Image (cartoon, rainbow, N blue to C red):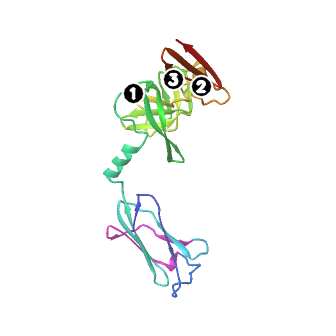
Amino acid sequence: MTLAGSVGEQVTIQFPAFDVDGLTPMTGLVDGDFDKVLLVDDAVSAQTVTVSEVGSSGYYVMEFTPDADGLWYAQVETPAEDIYADQIAVGPLTTDAVDSIAEGVWSEALPGAFVADSAGERLSSTDDRVETVHNALIMAVLTAEAGSTSTVLQTAAGQVDGFYDGLTLVVRNSSGSVARRIDSYVQTDGTFTIPELPFTPDVGDDVIVLGLLGEVAIAGDAEIGVKIAEIHQLLGLDPENMVCISKTRQVTGDIVLENTEIGDSLCVTRTS
């Protein structure tokens, strides 16, 4: 089996040590009890390899830190002359792998114009694991202004303090497009405070603010909130306030009966 690693990242390989019967664990061994071999691209490496026991279990770990890209070979021989070995491919991801990841990450803004109030999609993640996909609304399309840093963005936004708190902000820079959660927003200089970006925004970089549909739309707007409550009732989703309206019509000759249901009430209108 070939493991994957990177320069400067410690490699840990676990293995057991048994006595000559092949069954009895050998406990209490120290680093000097093992013979070790470390190669990189078929040449002996000068990197230090250490072996230590996991508690007093008879299980051990061999550890070393690669200092160069290449195909590494690590081998350890126990006092009972059992040999354990692994290969480690150390280096950057292949171009294909990088491209496939770039196409799938949610923080990459696609090329093109972004218009305020247009709809899109964004991913929500917990503990770095992607959980769900949410519809999103582009709340604002702004630009970075002078004075912006990797953690503080100054824009021309004019909303009141806290208006954008907790929403998602995307910065489009020549180094890439990155999304961050908005820790806080204040009206002075349209200032957004966010977790650190991997670059300092340039003046004129796009700053796009996203919000969840259905949540952001009614924030601070009592009239819209009332309208949504009415729609909720009309759809029959509020059992305490049923205002569901339905109509049916029956026609017999010149007689027309129109039945109108409003909640638990029925109104019949006859015309001829």
Q: Please check the rendered image and state whether residue 77 is part of the magenta-colored stretch, yes or no.
A: no
Name the residue that disc number 3 marks.
190
Q: Mark 3 or mark 2, which has the lower sequence index?
A: 3
Q: Nearer the viewer, residue 206 or 101?
A: 101
Whether pointer 3 and pointer 2 mark residues with C-beta atoms closer than 8 Å, the reply is no
Local packing at callout 3 (Cα closer than 10 Å; few below 14, some 14-19, many 20+) is some
Give me the residue at 37% from left, 38% from top: 175
Helix, strand or loop for disc 1 = loop
The amino acid sitting under disc 3 is Gly
**Magenta span:** 31-53
Helix, strand or loop for disc 3 = helix
Say above or below: 13 vs 81.
Answer: above
Q: Which mark is residue 114?
A: 1
Q: Mark 3 or mark 1, which has the lower sequence index?
A: 1
Q: Nearer the viewer, mark 3 or mark 1?
A: 1
Q: Is residue 21 visible?
A: yes
Q: Position of residue 46 (x, y in %)?
A: 40, 68
The amino acid sitting under disc 2 is Cys
Give me the residue at 48% from left, 78% from top: 34
Q: Position of residue 79 (x, y in %)?
A: 50, 83
Q: Nearer the viewer, residue 96 or 265?
A: 265
Q: Position of residue 269 (x, y in %)?
A: 58, 15
Give me the residue at 60% from left, 29% from top: 236
The amino acid sitting under disc 1 is Phe
Local packing at callout 2 (Cα closer than 10 Å; few below 14, some 14-19, many 20+) is some
Q: Please check the rendered image and state whether residue 46 is part of the magenta-colored stretch, yes or no.
A: yes
- Distance between the alpha carbons at the discs numbered 3 and 1: 19 Å
Q: Nearer the viewer, mark 1 or mark 2?
A: 2
Q: Which mark is residue 189?
A: none
